[in-house]
Image (cartoon, grey):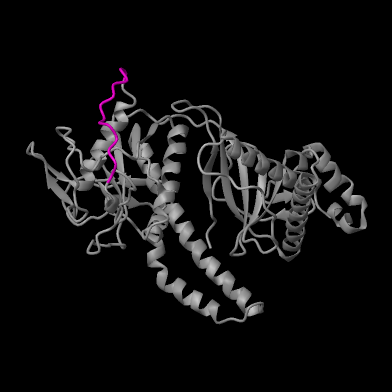
């Protein structure tokens, strides 16, 4: 299996600036049998320290005592615990691993308190929970204090674990400030490095683009380019069904069932890796070719509760827009989200007239002003115009007021075309992360059979 490499934004500067950014680079590692045992020991110790700290704070709260401070917590669950027979084995792993486990607990509490106090925007963050041995994802983190380092032979030296082979696909742009060792549900190991870097801006270009996201067409650009949704999960459905059936026939608690669980996890991991790789290539191409990118702020959480949930999650809109956002910040591009209540589909991109409800099976419509519109391309053009209005020099408000959408708009027409074998408008380079956009001529596009604009919970038509 090829190395799984991913550059994921964890922090970035202000919009439009090239401040210092934190990037996370993931590389596949291959520990031997002895190192896997040492890693399992480290995973277990970190899990125990996290759970002990959580129980200690829960008991203090139930007893009416004050909040246990971070220093007191570290003293009681690490320093003093090592002197007891029950927790003497905590000394077999690096102390940094244990301290970082408590740091994760403290961060979980801070996020929870910020959520209930209103400082944290978005969905409510749940209170910290106990970590379980059966959790699909096990992690430990090493900081610079642990003196981990990358050797000249390419191996990663981890304290009390050893020199672990790494499958490098690129060099790190700077010295890593920390490394997280991850074991996923499929039994694969990864090393995730956090590095500080500042990327040089790409050459300026006059192109700006609006993107309308959908289901059959993953992305429709304001210039008329359409990218067919690959639907990776749908394409792997037959194999996943067979593996799930095989898993259901195994006796619970048996070794064969454990092996079947790993097979299912590997199949899902392959789908996720393929989707992530494809989205990286497409997002890099869009950011490279356009100075400004505007997308619609879709309510993915709400759509995930509808009958379209499987298709919505298979599309991966949230991860794709996040890639666009952090890559725009890295390379000096402009990125903006347009209000989800903006009636991009029903408004004429030529005269600005907002029409009445348009049925979902109508993929092309004519405006009374005489303009003929493709439903998705028209929406992409309106998204581009709305995004530009938020960044014009005068700050003029050119968009109409928000109009609620009819309830039946968040559905897909049952007779819609469902092409899953091609990606129109782009040419993927298998050897790299970038892609080149193909010829942008309208020939060959099936504009009247695309149900991709039926994915919003409000004002989509």
User: Furthest-top residue in view?
Assistant: 394
The spot of residue 387 in percent (x, y) is: 32, 32
Can residue 433 be seen here? The reply is no
Front-lying residue, 389 or 181: 389
Front-lying residue, 64 or 310: 64
The spot of residue 334 in percent (x, y) is: 38, 30
The spot of residue 20 in percent (x, y) is: 56, 29
Give the side of residue 247 with respect to residue 211, left or right: right
Instruction: Tell me the quarter of the picture where residue 349 sits.
Output: top left
- For image coordinates 73% across by 39% down, the residue present is 144
- For image coordinates 33% across by 27% down, the residue present is 390
Can residue 16 be seen here? The reply is yes
Give the side of residue 145 with respect to residue 246, left or right: right
Above or below: residue 146 compared with residue 331 = below
Q: Does residue 105 belong to the magenta stretch?
A: no
The spot of residue 135 in percent (x, y) is: 64, 61
Q: Does residue 401 belong to the magenta stretch?
A: yes
Give, as a single range, the part of the protein colored magenta. Answer: 393-405
Instruction: Tell me the quarter of the picture where residue 290 sits.
Output: top left
């Amino acid at each position: 299996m090829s190395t799984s490499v991913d550059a994921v934004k964890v922090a970035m500067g202000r919009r439009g600036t090239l401040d210092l950014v934190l990037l996370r680079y993931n590389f596949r590692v291959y520990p031997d049998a002895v190192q896997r045992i040492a890693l399992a020991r480290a995973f277990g110790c970190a899990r125990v320290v996290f759970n002990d700290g959580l129980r200690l704070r829960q008991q203090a709260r139930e007893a009416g005592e004050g909040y246990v401070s971070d220093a007191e917590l570290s003293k009681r669950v690490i320093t003093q615990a090592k002197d007891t027979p029950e927790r003497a084995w905590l000394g077999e792993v690096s102390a940094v691993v244990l301290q970082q486990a408590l740091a994760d607990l403290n961060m979980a509490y801070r996020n929870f308190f910020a959520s209930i106090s209103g400082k944290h925007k978005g969905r409510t963050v749940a209170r910290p929970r106990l970590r379980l041995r059966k959790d699909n994802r096990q992690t430990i983190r090493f900081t610079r204090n642990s003196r981990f380092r990358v050797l000249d032979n390419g191996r990663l030296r981890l304290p009390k674990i050893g020199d672990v082979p790494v499958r490098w696909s690129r060099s790190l742009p700077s010295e890593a400030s920390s490394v997280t060792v991850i074991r996923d549900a499929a039994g694969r190991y990864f090393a995730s490095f956090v590095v500080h870097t500042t990327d040089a801006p790409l050459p300026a270009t006059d192109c700006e683009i609006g993107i309308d996201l959908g289901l059959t067409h993953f992305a429709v650009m304001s210039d008329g380019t359409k990218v067919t949704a690959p639907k990776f999960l749908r394409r792997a459905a037959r194999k996943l069904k067979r593996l799930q059936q095989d898993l259901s026939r195994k006796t619970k608690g048996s070794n064969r069932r454990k092996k079947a669980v790993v097979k299912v996890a590997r199949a899902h991991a392959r789908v996720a890796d393929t989707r992530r790789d494809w989205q990286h290539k497409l997002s890099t191409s869009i950011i490279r070719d356009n100075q400004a990118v505007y997308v619609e702020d879709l309510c993915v959480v709400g759509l995930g509760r509808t009958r379209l949930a499987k298709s919505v999650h298979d599309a991966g809109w949230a991860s794709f827009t996040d890639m666009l956002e952090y890559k725009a910040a890295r390379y000096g591009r402009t990125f903006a989200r347009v209000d989800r209540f903006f009636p991009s589909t029903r408004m004429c991109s030529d005269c600005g007239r907002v029409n009445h409800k348009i049925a979902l099976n109508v993929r092309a419509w004519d405006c009374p002003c005489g303009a003929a519109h493709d439903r998705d391309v028209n929406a992409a053009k309106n998204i581009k115009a709305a995004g530009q209005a938020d960044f014009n020099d005068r700050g003029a408000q050119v968009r109409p007021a928000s109009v609620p959408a009819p309830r039946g708009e968040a559905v897909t027409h049952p007779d819609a075309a469902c092409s899953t074998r091609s990606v129109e408008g782009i040419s993927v380079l298998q050897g790299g992360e970038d892609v080149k956009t193909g010829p942008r001529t309208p020939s060959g596009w099936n504009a009247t059979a695309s149900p991709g604009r039926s994915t919003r919970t409000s004002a989509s038509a």
